[in-house]
Image (cartoon, grey):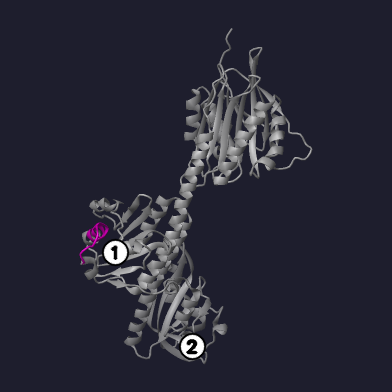
Amino acid sequence: MVRNTSGGQGRRWATQPEFWREVFDHLGAGLAVLDSSGRIIWVNPAAEELLGRTASVMRGQNFHGLLHHHAAGAYILDEQCPLLMALTRHISTRSENDGFLSGEELLIPVTWFSAPVTRNGHLLGMTVLFAGDATGSETAQGLAAHVTALEDLTDRLTVATEIATALAQTLDTEEAIARLGRLMVPRLADWAAIDLRTEEGVRRVAVVGPEGRDADQEAWRGPLPALGEHSRSSLVRVLHGGEPVLLGPKEIAAPPDSPLAAVQTGFLQALGAASAIIVPLGIVGRVTGALTLARTDAARPFDATEVSLIGDIGRRVGLAIDNTLRFGRQREIAEAMQRNLLVALPQPGRLRLAARYQPAPAGSQVGGDWYDAFLLRDGATALVIGDVIGHDLAAAAGMAQLHGLLRALAWDRTGPPSAIIDRLDQAVPVLTNVPLATVLLARVEGPENGLWQLRWTNAGHPPPLLVTLDGRADYLEQGQSLLLGADLGDVDRPDATAPLPPGSSLLLYTDGLVEVPGTDLDTGLARLRHHATTLARYPLDDFCDELLARMPAGNTDDIALLALRIPATEPE
């Protein structure tokens, strides 16, 4: 078994800009970096020496116009220049029979190779690697070796960068692992396996192979045997926080010394692995799992350089997965807190109430959305909808504080909704940790003379939507004031009233129902109004379910909604 014994600093060489400056400064061939228009951005010392021109003189000059000629001395027209054509087409090319003009106006026969530099599909420029053609085919062969090595190294580093970027874009563990597998296979390896340490033990959560892989390999996923304290197998030691390990045919064929080692050996042999690397996911003291990469081509084994690079990838991946796992646990706590506080609804008399809570999609943070409904001392029904600013466990905890405090204030004494919200606003900074929140408090009163009435105040929340049986839908935009925590000073919050016609539906909701990334709020409100009118005669539970189902994809926020249905006719 071959172990990588380089220290932590050595494992991070690929991420250090100073290292790459040393590499290019000591490269035995000239190297020029061009922008997308073909102008010189940077050259290395070998290029300065070969061309007899300083970097400061060449910087900003058109590479083709300044240097490029036929070996016989004739100037090459732009439309005939293979280098410019390669730049335009975003492809690599080479020439073994060209000349570059030196600072002394002497023509230097050269062999050159060029390759485009892209990011996310966009052309940034081009690299040109060149050498004087004094030794004929030997120079071409040497440059070809340089180019092959640089292209291979560049591709590996690109993969490392893409992995870091992809993992930074999600907080969902399953999505992070799926992205990781797609990026590593087949660019770094033929097969990849990801093992995570959990409270129940070690679990192989992903096995990724080439397209058309044998479906039987999926059987290797699932719980793995216990680690064991005395096993010296590579996987066990890596999971215990050991160094990355490079395995050749001899190590892969070695008899296992524990049940977990037997599973790993069987896995690698079933793949036909000729070479493998096993690296820890995470850093010393915080190892969340292990990454196994395998190649089946004996002519293309892993080497020590790749151990360093993949070890650095494992460190980054481990920290990213640790973050997603921590986020997932926090999200579960916040969701449980919210659901426990979203209490069963009363059904006062012939009024009907329904509510829904839809968490944000996986990978998004839980917010502070909440609803409530309860009977007041004077017999009226209180309806509440609110949203604590923020998307984390603190927001969910703040929602719990407001929930209890508002209930107590509303029950304590009878009064208009605005008076209760004013008292709540005064209490919030003293009794809670909530910085800002929206809330709408309404009283459903009646029936007097056969009519129901809504009395409400709105502290910065989206307006309620009233839908009548005849298909009319209106937003109740009266009674609005600033959100809780905005410091109104001596200004009193207003109340508003509106009749609730027989058979009508009142909808209270949070902004996740109408705010979709890529569209404006007016579009979202118009969409909700349209759907609500078409659903006006649906049973109340179906009304709520269909509203959620008809909202467009792409929502990243949680949603709470509370609906009230007024009896279609009053008893005589």
Q: Position of residue 126 (x, y in %)?
A: 46, 73
Q: Position of residue 570 (x, y in %)?
A: 58, 12
Count residues near mark 2 (Cα–Cα under 10 Å), then give few for <14, some for 14-19, many for 20+.
many
Residue at image point 66% right, 12% down: 449
Separation (CA) of disc 2 from disc 1:
44 Å
- Whether residue 310 is visible to the viewer of this picture, yes or no, is yes
Q: Is residue 506 above or below residue 36?
A: above
Residue closer to the observer: 173 or 344: 344
Count residues near mark 1 (Cα–Cα under 10 Å), then give few for <14, some for 14-19, many for 20+.
many
Q: Are marks 2 and 1 in contact (CB under 8 Å)?
A: no
Q: Which residues are magenta?
A: 254-266
**Quarter containing the C terminus:** top right
Residue receiving disc 2 = 51
Q: Position of residue 520 (x, y in %)?
A: 59, 43
Q: Quadrant of residue 385?
A: top right
Q: Quadrant of residue 386?
A: top right
SS at badge 1:
strand
Q: Amino acid at mark 1?
A: Ala
Q: Main secondary structure of the magenta part?
A: helix
Question: How many tags in the picture?
Answer: 2
- Whether residue 359 is visible to the viewer of this picture, yes or no, is no
